Amino acid sequence: MKYLDEYRDGGAARKYAQEIAHVTTRPWNLMEVCGGQTHAIVKFGLDELLPKQVTLIHGPGCPVCVTPLELIDKALEIAARPEVIFCSFGDMLRVPGSSTDLLSVKARGGDVRIVYSPLDAVKLAVQQPSKEIVFFGVGFETTAPATAMAVYQAAKTGLKNFSLLVSHVLVPPAMEAILSSPQCQVQGFLAAGHVCTVMGYEEYLPIAAKDKVPIVVTGFEPVDILQGVLMCLEQLESGRAEVENQYTRAVRREGNQPAQQLIREVFRVIPRKWRGVGEIQQSGLGLSDAYAAFDAERRFGVAELRVDESSECLSGLVLQGQIKPHECPAFGTRCTPEHPLGATMVSSEGACAAYYRYRRPEVEHV
Amino acid sequence: MCLAIPGKITSISGQDPLLRMGKVDFGGILKEASLAYVPEANIGDYVIVHVGFAISRLDEAEANKVFEYLREMEDLSELEETGQKKARKNSKRI
């Protein structure tokens, strides 16, 4: 596949790895923000190609993983209602809520459907006027333009039976929260390439300047990630702290303007709770006043629930990069993809799921 | 969810820019995607698609730079090697 296979070329990857070894003179800790990047690193063994002094810390860029427990429980309550068809991206279905998950609700008769695109949910609403269609809008800035368009089109066509359970989160505030933590070891970032495809990378300039961290917008294939690491290390070795773009084939500095416009029209920035991390100011998207009627929380009057996480689940520490998945005592034993304790073991972008899938023989507790 | 993949636009339909849809070829698999956010994209262009939406048109020239950089590094290291060989030769003469 063009624009994919060439970035998985082993020869190119090894050349970048050699150059990385060539420029590295001291220990450095880099964080890759996006869960998709974590998966590529673990799957292709990219961390093993790096010199021992370079440590990759896995970031919180897994929107499924950071969706707060309360929101999952609200989703479960709505999905169980007989008049509702609850639509969601696939990997939300097995994320554990306080006592159950969407897949179990489906098994017990709830109409829960996996959709590829938010527009599929809008189509469903048009086809089934006697049902209430709710879409679970989970994702970073990459996904917000899609849910924005779904709501925008629903509003334009006067659709009365469509609503959105919003769970969008923003990356830059999460990076700042990580940097402000006293335990923070991160010295440079590989920024999430597809988030920046939408948003551009201007909002990272003040972060790089204030915290003196290089930030390199990076793609998702092995060659991309290795080039991103090289660019970041070159900055660190020469004492620079700038924003650079590795993923130039897809990312422009100003990002995608029509997408940003629609996000601004349909959403507004709100505080959001990140599962395992806590509330981060200005870190989420909620529906703007003009589109408030499409808010599923409002439409279904779901009560504010106070819920506690499983004390055994250490997702929060994994998401902040403070422990690696296999350092959790429950990893691979009481917590597996079939019986997850937390979202990081379920999601296609979760670090625990990546380690379980690609690293288990090496790290299994025997 | 940042999972997005590149595909080639094979056909386009819809007049209203916000409703423009395209059939996108992902290595043999054809899927429909909204082209609302890539008004500049045409048939034959490659786009990155996330949850049914094209979010960027791929720039071929930029795409090649990743490999040009590698070739430059190779040229540089060859020069270094040649320089080192010459230096060793010279030092032997002395």
Image (tube, coloured by chain):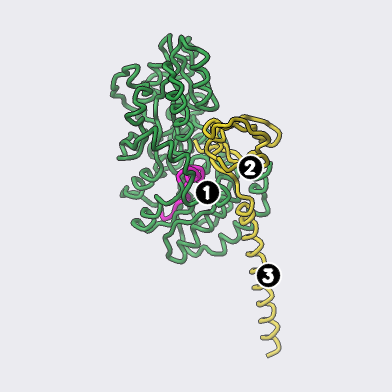
Kindly tell me whether residue A136 is visible in this rendering.
yes
Q: Chain of mark 3?
A: B
* Real-space Cα separation, disc 1 to disc 2, in angstroms: 14 Å
Chain depicted in yellow? B
A349 or A127, which lies in front?
A127
Taking A54 as reference, is A192 above or below it? Answer: above
A300 or A293, which lies in front?
A293
* Real-space Cα separation, disc 2 to disc 3, in angstroms: 35 Å
Q: Which residue is mark 3?
A: B78
Where does residue A141 sit, x and y in percent of width and height? 44, 39
Q: Which residue is mark 1?
A: A251
**Label 3 Cα neighbours within 10 Å, binned few <14 / some 14-19 / many ≥20:** few
Taking A187 as reference, is A35 above or below it? Answer: above
Q: Are marks 2 and 3 on the same chain?
A: yes
Chain depicted in green? A
SS at circle 2:
strand
Q: Is residue A190 found inside the magenta-colored segment of the image?
A: yes
**Label 1 Cα neighbours within 10 Å, binned few <14 / some 14-19 / many ≥20:** many
Kindly tell me whether residue A356 is visible in this rendering.
no
**Label 2 Cα neighbours within 10 Å, binned few <14 / some 14-19 / many ≥20:** many
- Residue shown at 61% from the left, 55% from the top: B66
Q: Amino acid at mark 2?
A: Tyr
Does residue A117 appear left or right of residue B80 in this picture?
left
Q: Which residues are magenta?
A: A187-199
Q: Chain of mark 2?
A: B
Q: Amino acid at mark 3?
A: Glu
SS at circle 1:
loop
SS at circle 3:
helix
Q: Which residue is mark 2?
A: B46
Q: Amino acid at mark 1?
A: Val
Q: Which mark is residue A134?
A: none
Q: Quadrant of residue B85?
A: bottom right
